[in-house]
């Protein structure tokens, strides 16, 4: 078994091991770490068939070991994965719904979001490597909702890690917010004026600002990322399609994976799983009204539109970061142009080499779901099947129903990515009842919040809201005040 190295999507000359890629967070030239497609390990049908008797943690070990064996002894990796994916902490199950269609419920972890799966792996991995090296890291995260809470929960209390989380002010639900703002300790949540794209631009810029890291903490390498741009967040997202198939496999029939997609980490994880030999016949990439990707698939032209506000708020992403990995995977290259002095993005989504669109279209189907269709889908699924979906799961179900033309006669799984209780008003608009709030969320809702604010406003441009120089300067000033 060959050791896998990771290169920057913007610099193929940079090749590092998993530990270095994890601790760096973002790759050189603002690229994302990716493995060579030819080096992705391939599983046999017999190996995949054996997973039907395994737990989630055991499947995770099988899927992730080929990427980690050279850096983490098997006994350590088993211990870390068994701890991350304990059944009592993060139960996972697949529910049959109608015909051959199923729902994969990834909503029962500590923060009631699919983000827990990657966050718990990430937290244990970074703590493991930092402990071995005797190092500290400051994890910088941008969130459109669920990522922040999952990372906060996974990193809270760790001795070697401090987490700084940027979230779009007033664009996430109150229950999502309190999962970040009530923990204290080593978790610092900053409300930012603007949308997720502004938060993401801020996180990327700081992650690459070695001069500021040196000035603030005396270590130019102290910043790292826990967003889905991190390889430590991407790899574990290749596990749950294997788990889903292990529970629904029917002889050798391939299955359709229908995935609500925002920053595309869950979708790219499934692309990797397919390349590993998992029999996925089609990957459905469901987006909301932020539909730059389906438009690109249809036309071959990538255009970044202003972000739109939708019920599936965690997917309000106009320019998904992991699109760089997807296009790289299919032989292309996309990057953001930046000002050479300020490093601010001047033009997003510039394709310098087109991917193999024919192959990409063969593997992936994508459409945008309109806002009113979120509510229609939640209502239909509740009426027909008695199942309450959240707005993101509704996108996954809607695109599957459209792809199958309502027949549901092919083996399929929809990823349900968040507990409906995190979006009570939207669920009520869809199904006419408020979802039950889990006790832990009720408790957090009553706790004291600690919120840091970036009061400056983003730039308003014809392409949408953009990170402003005033926001950058204020953020640095407040970080200096907070940590000095």
Image: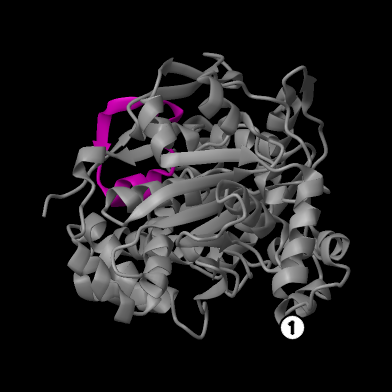
**Which residues are the magenta region?**
9-32
Q: x, y (%) of residue 247?
A: 41, 74
Q: Is residue 72 above or below residue 348?
A: below
Q: Residue at x 62, y 47 (%)?
A: 402
Q: Residue at x 40, y 40 (%)?
A: 363
Q: Is residue 452 above or below residue 96?
A: above
Q: x, y (%) of residue 400?
A: 58, 52
Nearest the camera: 161 or 276?
276
Q: Is residue 456 above or below residue 336?
A: below
Label 1: which secondary element? helix
Q: Residue at x 80, y 65 (%)?
A: 449
Number of other residues with Cα within 10 Å of mark 1, as a class: few under 14, some 14 to 19, many 20 or more: few
250 left or right, relative to 215: left
User: Does the rendering let one see residue 387?
Assistant: no
Nearest the camera: 257 or 212?
257
- Name the residue carrying label 1: 439
Q: x, y (%) of residue 393?
A: 65, 59
Q: Residue at x 67, y 55 (%)?
A: 392
Q: x, y (%) of residue 26?
A: 44, 38
User: Does the rendering let one see residue 241?
Assistant: yes
């Amino acid at each position: 078994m060959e050791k896998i190295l990771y290169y920057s999507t913007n610099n193929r000359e940079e090749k590092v091991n998993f530990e270095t890629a994890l601790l760096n967070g973002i790759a050189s030239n603002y690229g994302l770490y990716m493995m060579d497609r030819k080096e992705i390990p391939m599983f046999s049908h017999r190996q995949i068939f054996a997973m039907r008797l395994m737990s989630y943690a055991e499947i995770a070990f099988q899927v992730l070991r080929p990427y980690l064996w050279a850096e983490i002894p098997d006994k350590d990796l088993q211990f870390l994965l068994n701890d991350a994916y304990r059944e009592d902490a993060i139960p996972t199950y697949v529910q049959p719904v109608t015909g051959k269609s199923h729902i994969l419920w990834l909503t029962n972890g500590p923060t009631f979001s699919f983000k827990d799966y990657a966050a718990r792996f990430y937290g244990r991995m970074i703590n493991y490597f930092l402990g071995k090296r005797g190092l500290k890291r400051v994890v910088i995260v941008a969130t459109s909702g669920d990522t922040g809470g999952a990372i906060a929960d996974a990193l809270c209390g760790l001795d070697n890690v401090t987490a700084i989380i940027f979230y779009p002010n007033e664009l996430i639900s109150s229950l999502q917010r309190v999962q970040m703002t009530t923990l204290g300790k080593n978790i610092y949540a900053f409300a930012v004026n603007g949308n997720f794209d502004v938060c993401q631009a801020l996180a990327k810029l700081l992650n690459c600002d070695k001069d500021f890291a040196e000035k603030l903490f005396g270590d130019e390498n102290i910043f790292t990322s826990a967003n889905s741009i991190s390889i430590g967040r991407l790899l574990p997202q290749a596990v749950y399609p294997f788990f889903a198939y292990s529970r629904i496999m029917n002889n050798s029939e391939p299955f359709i994976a229908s995935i609500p997609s925002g920053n595309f980490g869950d979708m790219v994880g499934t692309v990797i799983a397919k390349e590993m030999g998992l029999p996925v016949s089609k990957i459905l990439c469901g987006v909301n009204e932020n539909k730059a990707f389906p438009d690109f698939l249809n036309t071959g032209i990538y255009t970044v539109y202003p972000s739109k506000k939708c019920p599936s708020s965690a997917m309000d992403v106009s320019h998904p970061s992991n699109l760089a990995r997807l296009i790289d995977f299919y032989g292309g290259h996309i990057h953001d142009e930046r000002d050479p002095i300020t490093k601010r993005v001047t033009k997003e989504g510039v394709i310098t080499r087109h991917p193999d669109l024919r192959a990409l279209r063969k593997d992936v189907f994508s459409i945008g779901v309109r806002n009113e269709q979120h509510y229609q889908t939640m209502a239909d699924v509740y009426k027909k099947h008695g199942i309450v979906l959240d707005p993101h799961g509704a996108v996954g179900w809607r695109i599957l129903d459209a792809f199958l033309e309502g027949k549901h006669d092919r083996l399929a799984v929809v990823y349900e990515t968040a507990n409906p209780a995190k979006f009570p008003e939207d669920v009520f608009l869809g199904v006419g009842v408020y979802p039950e709030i889990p006790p832990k969320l009720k408790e957090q809702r009553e706790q004291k919040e600690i919120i840091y604010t970036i009061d400056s406003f983003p730039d308003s441009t014809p392409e949408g809201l953009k990170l402003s120089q005033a926001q950058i300067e204020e953020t640095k000033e407040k970080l200096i005040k907070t940590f000095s």
